[in-house]
Amino acid sequence: MVGTPWQMVVAYVVIIASSLSLLTYWITKKFVLRKMNRTIMKAEHNYQQQIASLQMQLSGKVTVLEGMVNKLRLSNQELTRLNEIRSKFMSIVAHDLRQPLSSIQGFASVLMMDGPQGSGNNDQIALNNILKATDNMNMLMADLMDISMIESGRFKMDGQPFTFNTLVSDVVTLQAVNAQKKGIFLQKYDYPKDITVTADRFRLSQVLSNLIGNAIKFAPQGGRVEVSYYDEDPYLVCRVSDNGPGILHTEKEKIFQKFHQSDNNRNLKKQGWGLGLSIAQEIVNAHGGEIGVESAGLGQGAMFWFAFPKVPVASPAKPTV
Ligand SMILES: Nc1ncnc2c1ncn2[C@@H]1O[C@H](COP(=O)(O)OP(=O)(O)OP(=O)(O)O)[C@@H](O)[C@H]1O
Ligand SMILES: [Mg+2]
């Protein structure tokens, strides 16, 4: 059965269109898809190679890092060992130098008493200088021994009951001579007389001596230093204030670090080693207390304070100073 000519044309067109689409599909599959596949496989291969090389680099870096950690551990061990040696050395030096130093001091005092008297006498001036220098060295030795004891954990407090007022009186009396030399008015507020504390009297005297000594050292000629204390149950709070150069806000914590001396008092720096406050802090901390400083800034004077429990307690509330 033969259709109309139109039907024949449509049939031919359908056949030609089908053949063309089959041809297009075949060409696409043969050339384009294959090429795409090849490109994808190549890219995959490249990525795999890159990942492998990155993994190798990473493992190399991990090995280097492990080596560095090991080196760091060894240096750390070495540092700890050297620190122990330094600490031991410091304590041996400080201890062994004290003996000859006290001999020098003794002989210089004898020569001073035996020699011709008079303030203008050259021998007396020289002997006086020797005594001053040995005094300074003695103080440094004592500080170095304290530091070495602190570092080796041998810094122990010996708590005994005593009246705090007697300690303040003793320290103020000793420091009064230095205050007088600078024309400084050193005032102690004589109240409250009867607070008894259980603490290491010698070590707390050391704290107060350093605070008053510093106040006298840094206050101007003819200045003023005040010492007071009060009961802030369960704490005793002691304050030393002066009208000296004061402390910069940024220095308030630094001055309690070993050997730290503020740059503001360049010429007074030489009169010390920057050890007093760090030792004072160790002593107060060992009593379960706190030490600090208040100052409105440079030229505004300073008020140093320390507070400690009147009777040793496990964990008292913080003092309000
Ligand atoms: N009353 C004060 N006024 C101003 N600055 C002070 C005062 N007390 C301490 N300082 C600052 O804090 C620094 C550290 O004080 P610290 O008592 O530790 O050392 P030092 O007095 O210099 O030496 P050392 O106490 O070892 O003889 C001082 O050098 C000074 O810069
Ligand atoms: Mg000092």
Image (tube, rainbow, N blue to C red):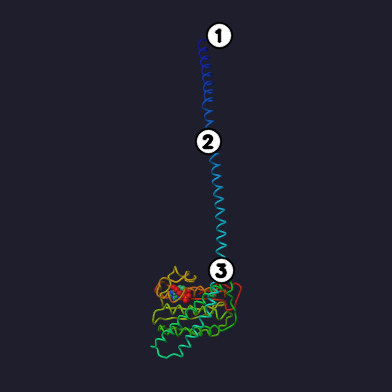
Residue 96 in view (yes/no): yes
Q: Secondary structure at mark 1?
A: loop
Disc 2 packing (10 Å; few <14; some 14–19; many ≥20):
few
Locate the N terminus and report the quarter of the image it occupies: top right
Q: CA distance from mark 2 to mark 3?
A: 62 Å
Q: At label 3, which amino acid type do we have? A: Ile
Label placed on residue 2: 1
Image point (52%, 25%), residue name: 31
Q: CA distance from mark 3 to mark 1?
A: 117 Å
- The residue beneath circle 3 is 85
Residue 303 in view (yes/no): no
**Label 2 lies in ligand 1 vicinity (Cβ under 8 Å):** no
Q: Is residue 82 above or below residue 168?
A: above
Image point (53%, 31%), residue name: 38
Label placed on residue 43: 2
Q: CA distance from mark 1 to mark 2?
A: 57 Å
Q: Nearer the viewer, residue 26 or 136?
A: 136
Which percent across, then down, holds residue 281? Answer: 52, 73
Which percent across, then down, holds residue 220? Answer: 39, 79
Q: Secondary structure at mark 2?
A: helix
Which mark is in front, 3 or 1? 3
CB-based contact (under 8 Å), mark 1 and mark 2 = no
Q: At label 2, which amino acid type do we have? A: Ala
- In which image quadrant can residue 182 be found? bottom left
